[in-house]
Image (cartoon, rainbow, N blue to C red):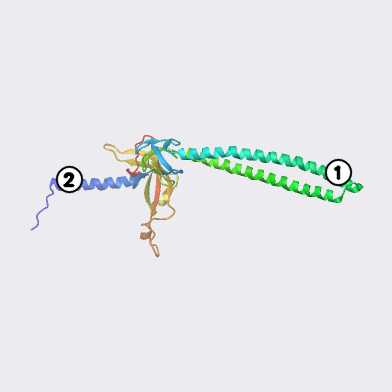
Amino acid sequence: MRYPIQSSPLVLAFILALSMIFSSCQKEEKLGFISSATLESDLWKVSPSVAGTLLEVSVREGDSVHQGQAIAWIDSIPLVLKLGELQAGYGELFANIRAREAEVATLQTAHEGIEREFARATKLVADGAATVQRKDDLETQKSTSISRIAAARSAIEALRSRNALLFAQEKSLRDQIQRCQVKSPASGRIMTRYRNNGEASIPGRPLVEIGRTDTLWAEFFIPQNQLAKFHLGQSLKIRLDAEKEPTWVPGKLSWIASEAEFTPKGVQTREARNELIFRARALAPNHQGQLKRGMPVEVWE
């Protein structure tokens, strides 16, 4: 004997709730839900290019910075002292150059006198009024004088080359002194501070990490069977969770990976191809500052 099953109000309510959830999920897919994602931002790890002692790191985690803002200062006194020694060497170098130039002028005057004597002796030898020995002596003096002048001029060129080297070293020291003031390469927010005042500044080791805040990006995945309807520059929507109503932020598809995240081996069946997913990114402007790095979001068409 069979008895009719009577549905209780609780069972009916449960079935109705499941029906609403299922219809809500179908509705979301029809509206264009693509994928869940996490917001990320471009990062800069700012490292010093000069070794020394950190006099001050003027920013902390959470501080906003703008491009070109000074964020740290390195002790530049050792470099300034080297620059002073270098500049002091200029005076000695210039004095040597002037002394060599005066020597060249003296040798040139003496050489001109020897040339006149040599020309006179040559004429006298031709007339038989002077000996050939006198002419040969003057010719030897003339050759020696030319060699001395050439040596003195070479010494001047060497000193001028030394001057050019000192000038290059001076420019390098001045550049290093300027780099003792570490500046922010971009506008953003300080994410991490790695060094404190008084610590050693080591080239290649970061002082702070800066994250871009004006534009963030959401990284998500596109299934292979939906890839054809997406293109770079396409407008998307970024959904943020809120207590009452969700917040929507406009986005733009900026990148799609050229290779799938999963590549099955062997012959690809239709079912295997449907398992392929492609990594993609959508840029989202952050004019109101509501987007934060690490925030979970949803990407919609």
CA distance for labels 2 and 1: 134 Å
Q: Is residue 97 rendered to the left or right of residue 107?
A: left
Assess disc 2: are there few (<14), some (14-19) or many (≥20) residues with their C-alpha within 10 Å of its C-alpha. Answer: few
| Disc ID at residue 120 | 1
Residue at 82%, 42% in the rendered image: 116
Check whether the beta carbons of the residues at disc 2 and disc 1 lie within 8 A of each other: no
Residue at 86%, 46% in the rendered image: 121
Question: Between 192 and 277, which is closer to the camera in this rendering?
Answer: 192
Residue 195, x across and y down, in percent: 37, 42
Residue at 24%, 46% in the rendered image: 21
User: Total label count?
Assistant: 2
Residue 192, x across and y down, in percent: 35, 42
Assess disc 1: are there few (<14), some (14-19) or many (≥20) residues with their C-alpha within 10 Å of its C-alpha. Answer: some
Question: Between 28 and 145, which is closer to the camera in this rendering?
Answer: 145
Q: Is residue 43 visible?
A: no
* Residue furthest bottom in the image: 266
Disc 2 secondary structure class = helix
Q: Amino acid at mark 2?
A: Ala
Quadrant where the image shows the C terminus: top left
Residue at 78%, 47% in the rendered image: 141
The residue under label 2 is 13
Q: Amino acid at mark 1?
A: Arg
Quadrant where the image shows the N terminus: bottom left
Q: Tell me: residue 54, above or below residue 135.
A: above
Question: Between 217 and 270, which is closer to the camera in this rendering?
Answer: 217
Residue 145, x across and y down, in percent: 75, 46
Q: Is residue 102 visible?
A: yes
